[in-house]
Amino acid sequence: MAFTLYSLLQAALLCVNAIAVLHEERFLKNIGWGTDQGIGGFGEEPGIKSQLMNLIRSVRTVMRVPLIIVNSIVIVLLLLFG
Amino acid sequence: MHPTGLAAAAGTPRQPSKRRIPVSQPGMADPHQLFDDTSSAQSRGYGAPRAPSGLGYSAASTSPQAAFLADPVSNMAMAYGSSLAAQGKELVDKNIDRFFPISKLKYYFAVDTMYVGKKLGLLVFPYMHQDWEVQYQQDTPVAPRFDINAPDLYIPAMAFITYVLVAGLALGTQDRFSPDLLGLQASSALAWLTLEVLAILLSLYLVTINTDLTTIDLVAFLGYKYVGMIGGVLTGLLFGKMGYYLVLGWCCASIFVFMIRTLRLKILAEAAAEGVPVRGARNQLRMYLTMAVATAQPLLMYWLTFRLVR
């Protein structure tokens, strides 16, 4: 199986893109994964679901601008070099 | 030119992390110092024979350059040049240290032959070892040279390179070799390693486990399986499929036990320290995570090598 570092990079880029297109209002709120729902109390440790929601929100916030740049570069390179 | 100056200048970069006076234990060299300091002995050695004949020699050796050095302009130029070089070196070091923590990496390569031998023995036969705790010396872990339980990066790095070479050898005996296949094998193994590290980091984050297991530690632990893989493939080359399965089975079992015993101390440490398992669900999740990591090792060992042995 040709599982190389390059294919890992491609898969990572696609995954981050997939997380970035999850719309906050239209989708996440409807399945109960919005960021203002389910932030439990302060005392106890956060469960897996709230950690996941935090992770999704932070990835979307942090990677928005770099994703634009990286996607443009990858599109241009793929168009040029196949 | 000045032996003491040389000794002082060469001595200080060797011990950058010495913040406190360490408690010296009998029979143990200073653990804050990762590598033996041979600079002072050298320059003392050079200084001693030089000192008595210094005057005569220095006059003779520097006289051809005396005219050059006495010139104030070239003196200044040399001083300026050396200060520029020092500044540049500082800048490069600082910037590189931001991206690659080189000073932390040095800890993982402070090994010696005895440690490597004992650790390799531990990797193939971990059943008799009793004490798996990493020793600490005033908050910092002791260098791998002094503690067999400490993770190191020397064995995984060497084992990885040896694995790629052995894979090339195995492919060559089956007439399937071509040079780009070496790169493919290396890339594939590295990709699996990266995937494992990312998966473990993600699960550690999701289950909010607070450990002192750093990323480099994880890479070190996950790199230990290459040793078993090399053993299996070499035996498969010498003794055919039966030998391959036997040795690989043995190494899989020992890596499984090794990983469980090592990770149990790191991931389940706080739970064990608290004594009573208060939150059963939390402990169960940690146990599942340790078991999953340990089970993934034999699977990957088989997956990466079975194609090499026919």
Image (cartoon, rainbow, N blue to C red):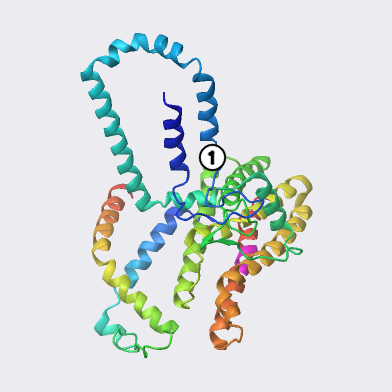
Magenta region's main secondary structure? helix
Residue B133: % across, % down: 63, 66
B89 displayed left or right of B193 = left
Res A20 visible: no
Crowding near the residue tagged with mark 1, few <14, some 14–19, many ≥20 C-alpha atoms within 10 Å: some
Foreground residue, B93 or A16?
B93
Residue B84: % across, % down: 26, 33
Amino acid marked by disc 1: Asp
Q: For residue A63, which quarter of the picture?
A: bottom left
Name the residue rendered at 48%, 63% in the picture. B214
Q: Give the position of the N terminus of chain B as an image quadrant.
A: top left
Q: In the picture shown, does residue B147 fall above or below A41?
A: above
Label 1: which residue? B37
Res B110 visible: yes
Foreground residue, B299 or B153?
B153
> Is residue B297 covered in magenta?
yes
Name the residue rendered at 44%, 42% in the picture. B12
The residue segment tinted magenta is B294-298
Foreground residue, B186 or B38?
B38
B34 displayed left or right of B306 = left
Q: For residue B290, which quarter of the picture?
A: bottom right
> Is residue B23 covered in magenta?
no
Q: Which chain carries label 1?
A: B
Q: In the picture shown, does residue B274 fall above or below B14?
A: below
Residue B91: % across, % down: 30, 43
Q: For residue B72, which quarter of the picture?
A: top left
**Element type where label 1 sits in the image:** loop
Name the residue rendered at 54%, 54% in the picture. B189
Residue B233: % across, % down: 69, 50
Residue farthest to the bottom, as pictured: A41
